[in-house]
Image (cartoon, rainbow, N blue to C red):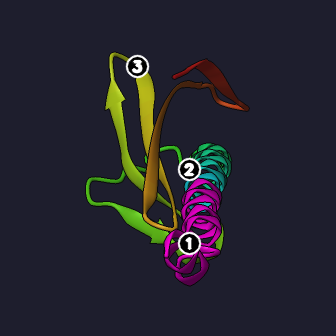
Amino acid sequence: MRNKIYKNNEGFIALTLVITISVLLLTFSYMQSIDVAHFFDMTLRKKYRLMNYHNAWNCIDQAILNLAHDYFYEVHTPVTILDLHCSIDVVKSENGLKIIEATGNYKNIYVQRRAIARLYDNRVEIVSIE
């Protein structure tokens, strides 16, 4: 009689063990894929921040070029340059210096930079960049 009970339950423990191990392995692989996706997202954001850092510098260069052409060039409302993915936010005079503020904007990640320039009759000198 005892042998009949064991014959009906043959393989139940093995099947339960296989299902348990499969669930654990699937959970582990899912957690690993989430970590990989998070790492990819972090590196992509870092790349975009670095790109916007240089994009803001491009707008500062453009503002300096405009200052070289026009001594009295000032900006009080943001001027967006779509090709460079940036905007010149402010160009103003303060204590004989020109303060230039620009923002890089690519993929809705914003990086702001600020430069201070001194104007001479024949050149533009960058005093500081922040």
Q: Position of residue 40 (x, y in %)?
A: 66, 55
Q: Is residue 102 shown in magenta?
A: no
Q: Amino acid at mark 3?
A: Gly
Q: Residue furthest left?
A: 76
The residue at the point 66 percent across, 44 percent down is 50
In this rendering, position of residue 68 left or right of residue 91: right
Q: State which region is magenta.
A: 1-29
Residue that mark 1 sits on: 6
Label 2 sits on residue: 63
- Residue at image point 46% right, 56% down: 109
Identified at 51% across, 22% down, the residue is 130
Instruction: Residue 123 in the image: state x and y as whole percent.
Output: 72, 31
User: Do callouts 2 and 1 mark residues in contact (Cβ within 8 Å)?
Assistant: no
Q: Secondary structure at mark 1?
A: helix
Q: Amino acid at mark 1?
A: Tyr
Q: Which residue is at the far right?
A: 122
Q: Of callouts 3 and 2, which one flags the residue occurring earlier in the amino acid sequence? A: 2
Say few, some or many: other residues with alpha carbon within 10 Å of mark 3 (under 14 / 14 to 19 / 20 or more). few
Q: Is residue 130 above or below residue 44?
A: above
Q: Residue at x 65, y 66 (%)?
A: 14
Q: Quadrant of residue 33?
A: bottom right
As rendered, which of 5 and 63 lies closer to the eye? 5
**Can you say whether 87 is above or below 15 in the image?**
above
> Callout 1: 10 Å neighbours few (<14), some, many (20+)?
few
Residue type at numbered disc 2: Ala
